[in-house]
Image (tube, grey):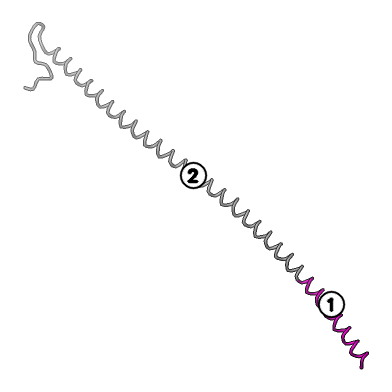
Amino acid sequence: AARRRLAQGLARRAALACLARALAAWRAAAAEQRALQRGHREAVLQWYIVLCTSALETWYRWLRRRREKRTRQARAAELFASAERTNAARSLLQRFGELCDEAEAACPPGAACASPLEVA
């Protein structure tokens, strides 16, 4: 009976030692798995950061070009309006010069003739 209890105690200790080793191995494997998952999450996060940075740079470049295009278009519209005003003034002055020439040609030499600016 004493031998039997001794054998059971030794078996129980051996079983507990085996269980402790298995538990330690399981904890080590779980810690390694967590470390791998953490590394994977960090890698994915880094990939997202690079991807988002690239997308934001592309969007900012598009926005900057769009603003530059609108600025150029506004400047072109201003230049066109200025050119139209200049052409209108040039046409009026040219027509006024033609009217003056016609009035001078119609007036006999030495006579006092009406200016094209006078309203009849």
Question: Residue placed at 14% from the left, 12% from the top?
Answer: 104
Instruction: Read off the magenta span.
Output: 1-26
- Crowding around mark 2 (Cα neighbors within 10 Å: few <14, some 14 to 19, many 20+) is few
Of the two numbered discs 2 and 1 on the same chain, state the one appearing first in sequence.
1
As drawn, 47 above or below 85 = below
**Majority SS type along the magenta span:** helix
Left or right: 100, with 61 as reference point: left
Q: Position of residue 72 (x, y in %)?
A: 41, 35
Q: Position of residue 85 (x, y in %)?
A: 27, 28
As drawn, 12 above or below 81 = below
Q: Position of residue 8 (x, y in %)?
A: 88, 87
Q: Amino acid at mark 1?
A: Ala
- Residue 5 inside the magenta-drawn segment: yes
Question: Residue placed at 49% from the left, 44% from the top?
Answer: 62
To which residue does mark 1 refer? 17
To which residue does mark 2 refer? 62
